[in-house]
Image (cartoon, coloured by chain):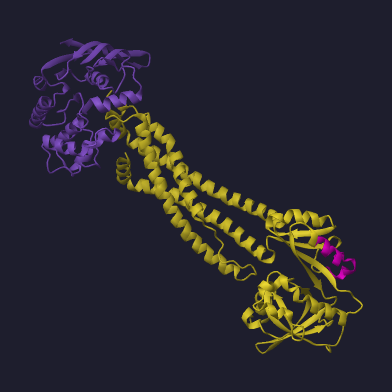
Chain colours: A purple, B yellow
Amino acid sequence: MIQLKNISKIFSSGKSKIAVVDDVNLEIKEGEFMALVGRSGSGKTTLLNLLGGLDSPTKGDIFINGKNISHSKDKELSEYRNKNIGFIFQEFHLQPFLTVKDNILLPTFFNSDDKNRVEYAKELIKEVELEGKTNSLVNELSGGQKQRVAIARALINKPKIIIADEPTGNLDEKTGETIIKLLKKLHKEHKITFVIATHDEKIASAAEKIIHIENGKIHHK
Amino acid sequence: MLKLAIKNIKERKFRSLLASFTIAIGTASLIVFLGLSDGIKQATFSELEKQSPLNQITVRPNNEKASPLSFIGSSKNKITDETIAQIAKIDGVTKVYPEIQYSNFSSLEIELLGESLVTDTMLFGVPKGFIENDLENPEDWDKTSEPYPVIVPRKLLDLYNLTVATSQDLPKLSEEILIGARPTLYPNYSTFFPVKDNQDEKIELEVVGFSDKVNFIGVTLPDNILKELNQKFNPEKPTNYIELFVETKDATLVPQVAAAIEKLDLSTFYLQKNLKDVEAKFTYLKITLGFISFVILLTAAISIISTFLATISERTKEIGLFRALGASKSHIKKLILIEAGIVGIVGSCMGIVLGLIGSVIIDQVGIGQLAQTTFTADTLFKITPALILQTLIFGTLLALISAYIPARKAANISPVKALNRL
């Protein structure tokens, strides 16, 4: 269970202060597939950053399974990201000099928990339908294939939450639909909480719950 | 993490190689300069030790300032049989070898390779114990009839070959050629000094060995023979002890034995005393060369800092991604330092190889040059496994220290800013 209580993120620009996320209260239940919908600049990426432990709120508290992570130290927050969060970015953010398998394994380089990580990476490659590409460099892949690698990478540490920021934003419509279908399938199979940020209502309609954000405030739950 | 660091280095091969090369130049200079200063020091000390072993003290009369040419003032000689007996009783003294000197000038004539050479010479006498290790057959020294055995200072042979033979177009001589040669001694006859104008008296000698320890301004005979010759040809002049060679049980006793001898109003000279001076000079040389290496390594360090700063600036997005995927600040720092460590190890290894190659080349050139002098050394370098290991550690540490600031900068990169997620 994720709880955001009176969360604000305020950026200063000279003398003026801008609340990019403004007094947000939100609950995301375990295993939920939630869409965060808003236009560019609405504050959805900042909210995802806070949710994913990439950034700390200026005000308010974030509880993950009852634990307040809003003021955690770097080491604790990094461990939280590594073990609990899987990120999927619009720009994929893959390492061009690494193979598909090594890109997927990247988050495991920062922990030493799972000894069967390579076997699990191979399983995920099958799940995202990239068999035969295990040892290919990611530069050789299409946009859709790159996003599949990023999805497998997000799953490698068996996280509790997947945060996807405009996961289809760099893909054509057809490939985007395939990726959303894949995410739905993985959500069903892995029983992970999915939070997808999008400006596209059509993609959002695939979610079980839709939250709208505008000017840093949540309008509809 | 190591795997990731290696992949990162491979991805930036050229830049990593360049950073390694700067370390390589620094470590190569360390190997060459430190190896050279230690090598020259070792060669010099071993040359000095040949002339005077570490457990030996040379004792000379105090008032004569200990010059080997001091025979002119021989009437003031203070070394007597009584002095020798007193020194022999000092704790730690195992042997006392007196050196005596013939009381007049003499000349030697030697027929070699079809040439007849005549030269003035001083004559010295030492007991068998002092030079028996330099003799192939020590019993040669016991001979009491002509030809009398004679030992030649090795330095004299070197000087002849390097100066006289070269300038006068005379044949060069070797120890092998000279052993067994029969020079003729003309006592009290000099080609330079108006001592005697005839060569009526002749004494046959035979070269039986070469030594680094004997007096280098003449030839040395058995002390008993020299005494006889002096009594026969200079009955009015006593045979003088010009110096004593005192051997101690071990080298550590030398300073205390020397102090006891000095109480007898005698001057002492021993290698350890001279070594302090020589050592100070070598320390200065080492510091100077070390400073040059330090400047080179400082340049390498600056180059590494700038290379890593540039690399990190290029890798902002990558580091931001690692942070998003769960890398802590210390993970990022560790990753950069592992990369720097690899660059340091590779650079140091390259530097060690370069340094060794450089040393061999410089050594060959240097030894070639030294062949024109009396300084004999097999090598001018002392490169030990310890020096190689220290250089490897130093080069690697330098890379790590230099990369620390860039590593800290990398660790502080905000994942939000790096991934343009503002």
**B416 in relation to B82, above or below:** above
**A218 in relation to B135, above or below:** above
Count the marks: how many?
0
Going 39% across and 46% down the picture, which residue do you hit? B343
Going 38% across and 45% down the picture, which residue do you hit? B342
| Residue A1 in view here | yes
Going 53% across and 46% down the picture, which residue do you hit? B295
Going 46% across and 49% down the picture, which residue do you hit? B392
Question: Whole-percent x and y of residue B366?
Answer: 56, 65
Foreground pick, B255 / B40: B255
Left or right of residue B30, residue A133 in this image: left
Any magenta on residue B123? no
Q: Main secondary structure of the magenta part?
A: helix
Q: Quadrant of the C terminus of chain B?
A: top left
Question: Whole-percent x and y of residue B393?
Answer: 46, 46
Foreground pick, B100 / A2: B100
| Residue B416 in view here | no
- Residue B122 position by quadrant: bottom right
Left or right of residue B94, residue A21 in this image: left
Any magenta on residue B73? yes
Left or right of residue B298, residue B127 in this image: right
Question: Whole-percent x and y of residue B240?
Answer: 85, 71
Left or right of residue B40, residue B191 in this image: right
**A74 in relation to B142, above or below:** above
Foreground pick, A141 / B41: B41
- Residue A46 position by quadrant: top left
Foreground pick, B65 / A205: B65
- Residue A104 position by quadrant: top left
Q: Quadrant of the N terminus of chain B?
A: top left
Question: Whole-percent x and y of residue B138?
Answer: 68, 77
| Residues rendered magenta in the picture | B70-87
